[in-house]
Image (cartoon, helix red, strand yellow):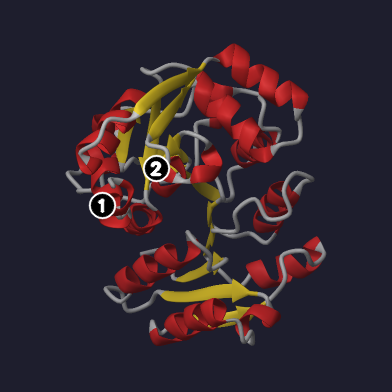
């Protein structure tokens, strides 16, 4: 195992499963150490959720390092140069404005051997530049930067959408209270979904795979379903009929034009168009290696109290 010192950036919704799984697998090696970079304020926080995560990280035998990713690049380079591999679970950080590019540049300038950037999401290249979601252009800039050099090996993990998001009221697709489904784009438009727990598990598998995976985009998936499949899942788990309505791309585009900075409407436009947001399960890392993952139906069964919406 070449990457003996691993630094994970962030400990949020995705960071925690990545920390759990990489630290667990690292125990199979004599020479692998795992460190997590968090703000000092987070490490010392009295917030119950943050406190719980910090306690768990310590109990996993993982080192905590205080640092702030909004610090000048020179400070980040000084931190990063002490590590062989960096896995970024930062989310979009400060949104658009060069945050991901700044991190990637600091990783390369620090001479880090291997980098897993924050690209856990859709297929940005298929979507292309100038999409409704302007954050995606910077993700493409990061890919170009990584490909333009050879010293730092990189791995990008494409996951699709977090499974839970499809069931969240804010996304405007599934309305449990009113038993209705509003498909976006078309009923046969597909979306790939993966839970953060599965992403964490598969990231660890990909990280420790021998021979080492490098300079590659690796696709994973918990499930790939259409909006019609989602309606069928809701009806089968609730035992009730759901009203089915469709917002076509014309309606979605108009919605976004009238509210161009709305984050959710940007995403509805991307997922309604259906381009670069799904891939077949059999083509994924987990599909090819026979690693089981959580289906959309299983997630919905385990996490939603269907009975309370069936009255």
Per the image, label 1 sits on a secondary structure element best described as helix
The front one of 297 and 134 is 297
Q: Name the quadrant containing residue 50.
A: bottom right
Mark number for residue 176? 2
- Residue 2: x and y in percent read 41, 63
Depicted 280 relative to depicted 171: above or below: above
Mark positioned earlier in the residue sequence (2 or 1): 2
Per the image, label 2 sits on a secondary structure element best described as loop
Residue 72 visible from this viewpoint: yes
Residue in the image at 64% along x and 31% along y: 266
* Mark 2 → mark 1, Cα distance in angstroms: 11 Å
Residue in the image at 36% along x and 17% along y: 188
Residue 130 visible from this viewpoint: no
Depicted 110 relative to depicted 140: above or below: below
Residue in the image at 54% along x and 82% along y: 48
- Residue 111: x and y in percent read 63, 59
- Position of the N terminus by quadrant: bottom left
Mark number for residue 192? none
Single out the residue that lies furthest toward the top.
Answer: 250
The front one of 200 and 260 is 260
Single out the residue that lies furthest toward the front.
Answer: 311
- Residue 37: x and y in percent read 60, 73
- Residue 272: x and y in percent read 51, 23
Name the residue beneath numbered marker 1: 307
Numbered label tally: 2
């Amino acid at each position: 195992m070449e990457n003996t010192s691993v630094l994970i950036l962030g400990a949020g919704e995705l960071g925690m499963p990545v920390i759990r799984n990489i630290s667990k697998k690292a125990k199979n090696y004599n020479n692998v150490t795992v460190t997590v970079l968090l703000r000092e304020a987070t490490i010392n926080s009295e917030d119950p959720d943050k406190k719980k995560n910090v306690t768990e990280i310590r109990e996993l035998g993982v080192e905590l390092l205080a640092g702030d990713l909004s610090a000048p690049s020179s400070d980040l380079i000084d931190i990063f140069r002490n590590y062989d591999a960096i896995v970024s679970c930062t989310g979009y950080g400060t949104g658009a404005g060069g945050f991901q590019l700044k991190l990637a540049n600091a990783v390369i300038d620090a001479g880090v051997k291997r980098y897993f950037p924050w690209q856990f999401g859709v297929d940005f290249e298929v979507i292309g530049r100038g999409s409704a979601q302007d954050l995606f252009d910077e993700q493409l800039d990061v890919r170009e930067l990584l490909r333009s050099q050879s010293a730092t090996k990189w791995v990008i993990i494409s996951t699709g959408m977090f499974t839970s998001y499809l069931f969240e009221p804010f996304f405007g697709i599934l309305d449990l209270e009113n038993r209705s489904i509003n498909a976006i784009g078309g009923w046969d438009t597909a979306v790939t979904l993966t839970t953060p727990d599965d992403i964490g598990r598969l990231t660890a598998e990909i990280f420790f795979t021998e021979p080492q995976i490098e300079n590659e985009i690796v696709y994973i998936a918990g499930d790939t379903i259409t909006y019609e499949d989602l309606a069928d899942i809701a009806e089968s788990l609730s035992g009730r009929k759901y009203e089915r309505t469709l917002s076509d791309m014309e309606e979605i585009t108009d919605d976004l034009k009238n509210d161009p900075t709305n984050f959710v409407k940007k995403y509805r436009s991307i997922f309604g168009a259906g381009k670069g947001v799904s891939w077949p399960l059999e083509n994924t890392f987990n599909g090819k290696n026979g690693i089981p993952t959580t289906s959309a139906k299983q997630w919905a069964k385990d996490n939603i109290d269907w009975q309370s919406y069936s009255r």
